[in-house]
Image (tube, grey):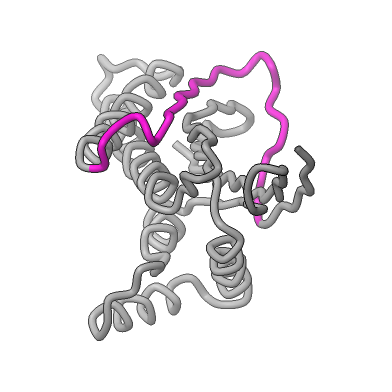
């Protein structure tokens, strides 16, 4: 199996080995769809809850308690959004696992890096790449309003509203990595990793 790689936006490919992280792996075909959606929210809450244990904050202090709560809420929203998208657009014919998790970076500020990896068809990769280019060349707030209006008029299956909410409401920095995969057993497909960095 061979592959070619391409990145967009703010994507971190290698993390410092001394930094904390947590990763979950799903085999999407092993669980019925309805149960899978319930599991997504539980997984997002678990990731967010676990992440707060990395924070060098004292939960006995009121101000820091508030910050922990806000951090947990932000990580939970981002994690749920990324995991739902990974499940929704996953190309099951590829028989590849979905990976999902969080890294904790502590530099001058505290950063949560949430990511999800899944396989997509060539057609869905093109749609996502078009959305990325549109995002890079337009104001996110204007795009958000435009997408809201469009959704009110028609059912848009690939709206990008969740990603725009992450950017506008949580000041998220987003990056993507595409790896084109090919094998003798099935058509080419892409492994896509979506990554969101939010300051907590």
In the foreground, 6 or 15: 6
Q: Quadrant of the N terminus?
A: top right
The one of 174 and 116 positioned closer to us in this rendering: 116
From the viewer's perspective, is 9 left or right of 31? right
Q: Residue 67 or 168: which is nearer the viewer?
A: 168
Residue 85: where, in percent of width, then height?
Answer: 40, 51
Instruction: Identify whether 39 is placed above or below 11.
Output: above
Indicate left or right for 161 with 101 as reference. Answer: left
Quadrant assignment, res 33: top left
Q: Residue at x 49, y 49 (%)?
A: 91
Q: Residue at x 67, y 51 (%)?
A: 178
Q: Nearer the viewer, residue 33 or 156?
A: 33
- Where is 23 relative to 127, above or below? above
Kindly indicate the quadrant of the structure image that contains residue 168: bottom left
The residue depicted at 39 percent of the width and 19 percent of the height is 57
Q: Is residue 166 above or below residue 42?
A: below
Give x and y (percent) for residue 71. Answer: 36, 35
Let me know if residue 62 is in the magenta part: no
Q: How many marks?
A: 0
| Above-or-below relation of 36 to 22 | below
Q: Report the span colored magenta.
A: 9-33
Q: On the rendered structure, is 50 left or right of 180?
A: left
- Which percent across, then down, holds residue 84? 35, 46
The outermost residue toward the front is 185
Residue 121 in the image: state x and y as whole percent: 56, 57
Residue 19 forms part of the magenta stretch:
yes
Quadrant housing residue 80: top left
Which part of the image, by quadrant, shows the C terminus? Answer: top left
């Amino acid at each position: 199996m061979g592959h070619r790689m391409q990145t967009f936006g703010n994507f971190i490919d290698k993390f410092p080995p001394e930094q904390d992280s947590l990763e979950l792996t799903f085999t999407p075909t092993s669980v019925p769809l309805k149960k899978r959606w319930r599991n997504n929210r539980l997984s997002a809450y678990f990731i967010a809850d676990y992440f707060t244990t990395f924070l060098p904050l004292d939960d006995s202090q009121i101000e820091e308690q508030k910050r922990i709560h806000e951090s947990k809420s932000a990580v939970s929203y981002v994690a749920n959004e990324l995991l739902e998208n990974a499940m929704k657009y996953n190309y099951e014919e590829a028989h590849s696992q979905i990976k999902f998790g969080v890294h904790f970076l502590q530099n001058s500020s505290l950063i949560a890096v949430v990511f999800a990896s899944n396989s997509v068809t060539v057609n869905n990769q093109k749609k996502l790449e078009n959305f990325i280019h549109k995002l890079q060349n337009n104001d996110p707030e204007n795009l958000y309003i435009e997408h809201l209006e469009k959704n009110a008029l028609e059912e848009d299956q690939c709206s990008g509203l969740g990603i725009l909410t992450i950017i506008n409401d949580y000041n998220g920095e987003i990056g993507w990595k595409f790896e084109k995969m090919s094998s003798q057993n099935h058509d080419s497909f892409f492994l896509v990793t979506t990554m969101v960095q939010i300051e907590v």
